[in-house]
Image: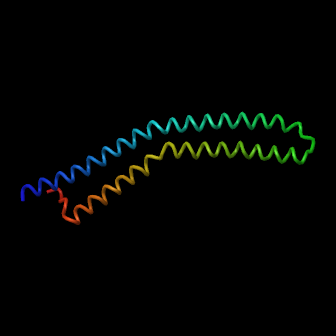
Amino acid sequence: MLRQKKENKKGNVTLYLTFFIVAIIILLVTAVTAPVGVLLNTKFYAAGEDILLKANNSISDINDANVRTQIYDMIDNSFDAQENNIEVNNALFQYAWVPMVILTMLIIFLSSRALVETRQGGGFI
């Protein structure tokens, strides 16, 4: 009986340690990848902006006013889309760790419930 209680506590401690270790790994990885992702996103924006500005300069050589206006509108829309994409990507990079931690908690909770229900792992006593 004493051995069974001791094994049950080992199972609980293992689940807690697994959660904390995985949570720390997720936080460390996202703490490193989030700034790198934001930097990469900014570099892509700068490169795209240069391309659009060069295209904007060459559009002025088009003789047809309707075509020139349509292309200017498309470039303006591209600038707006780039800014929107940067905002969305920055938010995704910054908060990607939250669903990962929640998912990890859910998996460990369900694993512990399965252990308790199959009587392979006991309670806290």
Give the farthest residue toward the bottom: 117
Give the farthest residue toward the right: 63
Query: Which residue: 55% across, 42% down?
Result: 90
User: Residue 116, position in %: x, y?
Assistant: 22, 62
User: Residue 98, position in %: x, y?
Assistant: 43, 49
Query: Which residue: 26% across, 63% down?
Result: 114
> What is the quadrant of the N terminus in the image?
bottom left
> Of residues 119 and 69, which is closer to you in this image?
119
Above or below, 42 against 122 in this view is above
> What is the quadrant of the C terminus in the image?
bottom left
Please state if 65 lies on the left or on the right of 76 as rendered. Answer: right
Please state if 31 lies on the left or on the right of 46 as rendered. Answer: left
> Of residues 32 and 124, which is closer to you in this image?
32
Colour option used:
rainbow
Please state if 40 lies on the left or on the right of 4 as rendered. Answer: right
Q: How many marks?
A: 0
Picture quadrant of residue 111 = bottom left
Above or below, 101 against 29 in this view is below
User: Residue 62, position in %: x, y?
Assistant: 89, 40
Query: Which residue: 89% across, 36% down?
Result: 61
